[in-house]
Structures are given as C-alpha cells and as structure tokens.
Image (tube, helix red, strand yellow):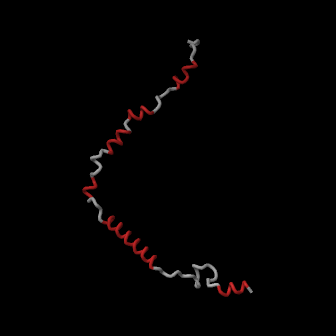
Amino acid sequence: MHITLINFFKKTVPGHIFRGKRRFVKPVSKRSMDTLTREYERQEQIMLLLRNPYLTLEQSSGHAKELQKREKLVAKWTTEQTLRKMKPHVTIEERLNQLKIKEAWD
C-alpha cells in the first residue's frame, strides 16, 4: 500500500531524465539568461581586442631589437662558454698512462 502511494504521487520521468521523448526539460530562468548574456558580451569584447590590436604590424616588427634579446641568447652559447662547462678531451694514451711503469721491451 505504501509503495503504491509513493509511485502514485511520483512526478518524474521513466528512465534517464535528460534523454528520450519523455525527458525532463528545465525551464529557462532569468538568472541563466543574464549569465549567458554577460558571457557573450565578454567574448565579444575579447574578440574586439583581438581584431584591433594595439600595435600595428610595422610597430610590432622591431620592438624586440632594442632589448637585444637575440644577442644575449647568442652570447650565452659561445664556444668558450660551452667549452668551459664541458670536461676536457681525454685520449686513450692518457687513460692508460697509469699502467706504464717502465718500458722494458725498449
């Protein structure tokens, strides 16, 4: 009896509530419309800034030359600086030099 009363007053849809022909459709509220409107306005402002850049192509082409970033990067990779970080070259003779005690066969 109690289960029948619960099922009788139940106001949901059968199966998955957001799919199918008897799906539950949420009513559109004022708050959701305002949120969506604000989001669209924000996207439009961003697109306006992207369409009209602050610098022209001529102004933006050489703005980094004054900072000399390229020269600093090249100076960082000079040969003397890289050789300083590397270990010195070692030949096989120098490695096996410790085994030499005397040269008796000469």
Picture coordinates of residue 7, whole percent (x, y): 68, 85
Of residues 53 and 37, the one nearer the viewer is 37
Please tell me whether residue 42 is drawn above or below residue 75 in the rendered image: below
Picture coordinates of residue 97, whole percent (x, y): 54, 20
Quadrant of image for the C terminus: top right
Of residues 42 and 60, the one nearer the viewer is 42
Instruction: Count all numbered tags in the image, as a single digit.
Output: 0
In the rendered image, the residue lying farthest to the left is 58
Instruction: Say whether residue 25 is left or right of residue 57.
Output: right
Residue 96 image-quadrant placement? top right
Please tell me whether residue 12 is drawn above or below residue 79 in the rendered image: below
Instruction: Say whether residue 55 is left or right of residue 27.
Output: left
Residue 33 image-quadrant placement? bottom left
Please tell me whether residue 58 is drawn above or below residue 100 in the rendered image: below
Picture coordinates of residue 1, whole percent (x, y): 74, 86
Q: Residue at x 48, y 81 (%)?
A: 28
Q: Residue at x 36, y 66 (%)?
A: 46
Q: Residue at x 38, y 32 (%)?
A: 80
Please tell me whether residue 67 is drawn above or below residue 14 in the rendered image: above
In the rendered image, the residue lying farthest to the right is 1
Picture coordinates of residue 73, whole percent (x, y): 36, 42
Instruction: Say whether residue 64 is left or right of residue 83.
Output: left
Q: Residue at x 28, y 60 (%)?
A: 54
Of residues 105 and 83, the one nearer the viewer is 83
